[in-house]
Image (tube, helix red, strand yellow):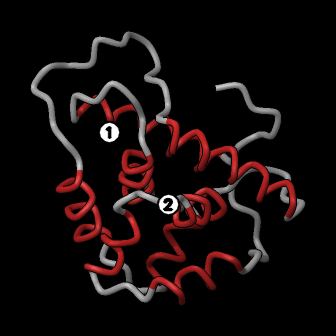
Amino acid sequence: MPMHQPLTEHARQVLDQAQHEARSLGQEFVGTEHVLLALLKSAGAHAVRILRQQHVDRDALATQLRSALSYSEEPPGVTGALPMSPKMQRALNSALVMSRSQREPKLSTRVLLLSLMEEQGTPFLAALRDTGVDVEQLLRALQEKPTDEEA
């Protein structure tokens, strides 16, 4: 995935883990839900700290997201890196623009999560609400620029 702006180490790990999430479900592409599932498994990422501060039940949220995804017994026919879905590509492009506009040196998981929350037509917001998350409060927390830079 060619990028002109570097990713934080956590953001890179999340995108790599999203490949595994998609493959484990027999998907032919990496979608927004796969990136979110990978993010929920991430340890130490800034976005995860914010989710924890907002009392998000990551296990319940992951269960909700998985229930919205189809599963195939067949492994993907794609070898190498799976392509991103159009929605995921849009969300990533939006995150890059957001990160640049906030003058952040690297694309962080915080900005990536914020961008994913703004992507229309994904089951993520419904899953957040279904698990009791105050979505507006979470958005406000994500929009606050951190004082410490994510690794």
Q: Residues within 10 Å of mark 1 (few under 14, many from 20)?
A: many
Residue at 63%, 45% in the rendered image: 92
Q: Which residue is more in the foreground, 46 or 125?
A: 125
Could you say where residue 96 lies in the image, as x and y percent from the top left?
74, 48
Residue beneath disc 1 = 21
Q: Distance between the Cα atoms at labels 2 and 1?
A: 21 Å
Q: Which residue is more in the foreground, 87 or 116?
A: 87
Q: Residues within 10 Å of mark 2 (few under 14, many from 20)?
A: few
Dividing the picture into quadrants, the one containing residue 3 is top right
Earlier sequence position, callout 2 versus callout 1: 1
User: Which disc is residue 32 wearing?
Assistant: none
**Amino acid type of the residue that numbered disc 2 sits on in the rendered structure:** Gln
Dividing the picture into quadrants, the one containing residue 139 is bottom right
Residue at 33%, 81% in the rendered image: 129
* Direction left: furthest residue: 73
Q: SS at mark 1?
A: helix
Residue 87 is left or right of residue 59, and the answer is: right
Residue 108 is left or right of residue 121, and the answer is: right
Residue beneath disc 2 = 120
Q: Which residue is more in the foreground, 122 or 11?
A: 122
